[in-house]
Amino acid sequence: MIQKEEIQRGRIDDEFVRLSITGKIDDILLQKTPVNLTNIFSEIGNRRNFVLIEGAPGSGKSTLALHICQEWAEGKLFQEFDIAILVKLRDPLVREAITISDLLPCTNKAMANETETAIMSLYGKGVLWVLDGWDELPSDLPRDSIINKLIRPDMSRESPLHESAVIVTSRPSSSAELHPLVSSRVEVLGFTPHKLEQYFTECLKGDSQAVQTLLERIRENPVVEGSCYLPLNASIVVNCFLSDNHSLPTSNHGIFTSVVQSSLKRYLQEKLGKTTPVGNITSPDSLPSEIRTQTVQMCQLAYHGIEQNKATFTDRDLTALRITKDISNVGLLQTVSSIISDGHLVYYCFLHLSIQELLAAIHISLMSPKQQISVFQKLFGSPRFSAVFQFYAGITKLKTSRPILSLLPRFLCPVPATVFDLVRKVVKTEKEKFSFEPKPLLLSLINCLYEAEDSRLCVFVANLLNHNLDLDYTTMNPIDCLSVGYFASACSNTSNEFTLSLNNCSIDDQGCKFLARGLSKCPNSNNDIPTAGIHIAEIIENTSSISKLDLSNNAIGNSGLCTLCEALSTNTSLKILDLDYCSLTISDDNGAALYQLLNTNNSLEYLNLSDNTVTSCRHIAAGLAVNKTLRTLYLVSCELTDQSIEELSTGLINKIKALYIWGNDSITEDGIKTLSRHLTTHCSELTQLSIPRHLISCIETVFRDANKERKRNGLPEIDVY
């Protein structure tokens, strides 16, 4: 995880923006560990030097790739390599490359062949390949491509490059096939809040008042706030701030629409000398005649790129689609020269991925309803389906072809395919996955529902999900959290209980805040941020329908726990609360919050506090003594001692049915005997007890007699294991 790469730019429209890889905000990787750029090869050991650098589009991966090569050339980085070769994988000539010489930026073929011979003679040893943009390569890359030989040396019988070191950059949604091949995965995170403010200060030329105004506007806008950590998005936002009288877009769709609008406006003013309003790009008829044809053709070209999974276009592509070359004049389509040509200049056109996905969505929205669904059925499952469909949702609000008949069961009314059928397909595909598998397609659908802003659609999807949104193990960025919150809020207006499970979603404090914002929008976590519980508490206070809340592996912390318990004290719907591994320390000093929860909450039936530190059970016991609803309590691996068990026993006088205390190796046989003596006359409904493994012999020596005594007292036997 590259945290210390400092990219400082003084202007908005500079080389950084042009070189940045762009596209939909992707998932962020789990299990993050800080690493310095100089050390990315140091811990690989005997494995092949193959590093995958991932990150959301616009986070600076291409800038980092260029930086690595520049630092090597200046003798500052990776000097163990004799040569570093940067390859832009978006270059169409790269796809056709068969030999190493085809990839080299040499002035003539003889020089390229000589260099290739030298590299091959050492099986690539001493060579560092920096391959930028794996996600921009076509999926049908030829088997004999030199890129395949670099990535998968075993595919070639001779393996001529197996000694080479390789760095590949990619967006996470397109890199899954590389994971088994790489020796290390690194993530580029983008701007920290401090660096973001520094960047805005440079862009606004040190105007501190303007910077604070911009930051205030951003904080008021959750979508913008949740995406500005990406340098590319930050540059777009500050550009909007400067050009649109300090106003900002309010959605992901709006962010990139503003880029297109600005480009068309600049073309009209600077190239044609016109001050005509641009109009609405989603409705070509509203555009001025001077740019109407180019815009429609640009949308057509973008759709072709999505169909063919390509980001670059040649003259042949334009000719085949009957598109005039002057569309590049409007500024969206960049003309780039290839560096791997043989003595003559070769140009190709690049349309950045997010803009391409937006324009493709516009093109699809202008088709007939039947054609639209046919297109999405064809794109379903492709890497870029989610991004295009989300932009489409923002444009159409998913209102295209939505007759009331489509809400009826299919066997009652076999109507033509509609958007609802596509939604059903997404839900069906994700529901068939195992519980531990990530569900990015389902999460993308939830994002689409937020863009559509239609609570009735949310209820429709909730019914398909049986009122259970399970996103366990699906990494969520703040925008995702905002959408999930909105979805849960919309579903809370129904009479059905709604279950939301977000275990191991890598939700941070900002994500929790956005969950709360999403819940309030509808009018009807391996994390390390201790204030997350504050925002979770706000979530609970904003909804009355959530019956299960799984916050496992999210570092709520003690301060968050206090706020959370306070919110739950008056909640009447939550039955299951899972706080496993939440960085809690429950002691005499700070356990009062749990007592308050157990004393006042009248709905909670299941509480899991496992894998936290419990140094005292006094407050838990006091709460158990007065609680009337709790049936299951987990205190697994909580560092309990004999003293803890003695304290806990005093509270076991209620109707609790299951108690789990295994994994506490400090408990001795004396502690178990203390517990068994208490249970001979208390806990009339306790039937399950799980004890530490090293005390398993106590089942025969201690609990056999305790169960006999319980039976004489008219109490059920306890199944101890």
Image: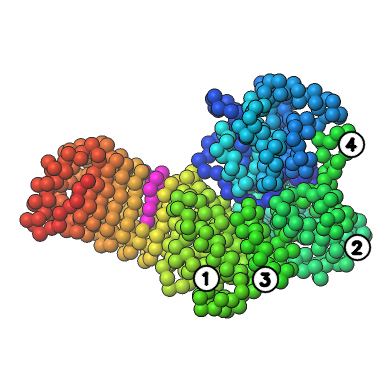
Residue kind at label 4, given as amino acid type: His
Residue 421, placed above or below residue 101: below
Residues at marks 4 and 2, CA–CA distance in whole angstroms: 38 Å
Q: Name the residue under label 2.
A: 274
Residues at marks 1 and 3, CA–CA distance in whole angstroms: 21 Å
Q: Earlier in the sequence, mark 1 or mark 2?
A: 2
Whether residue 645 sits left or right of residue 564 in the image: it is left
Image quarter for residue 245? bottom right
Q: Which of 380 and 210 is in front in this view?
A: 380
Q: Is residue 359 visible?
A: yes
Residue 582 colored in magenta in the image: yes
| Image depth: mark 2 or mark 3 in front | 3
Q: Which of 144 and 225 is in front in this view?
A: 144
CB atoms at circles 1 and 4 under 8 Å apart? Answer: no
Q: Mark 1 points at which residue?
A: 460
Measured as percent of width and height from the top left, residue 460 is found at 52, 70
Q: Name the residue under label 4.
A: 344
Tell me the magenta residue range: 577-585
| Image depth: mark 4 or mark 2 in front | 4
Residues at marks 2 and 3, CA–CA distance in whole angstroms: 38 Å
Whether residue 159 sits left or right of residue 673 in the image: it is right
Give the structural element (helix, strand or loop) at label 4.
loop
Q: Name the residue under label 3.
A: 370
Q: Which of marks 1 and 3 is nearer the N terminus?
A: 3
Residue kind at label 2, given as amino acid type: Lys
Give the structural element (helix, strand or loop) at label 1.
helix
Give the structural element (helix, strand or loop) at label 3.
helix
Q: Residue at left 59%, top 76%?
A: 415
Farthest residue toward the front?
157
Q: Can residue 237 be seen in this view?
A: no
| Image depth: mark 1 or mark 3 in front | 3
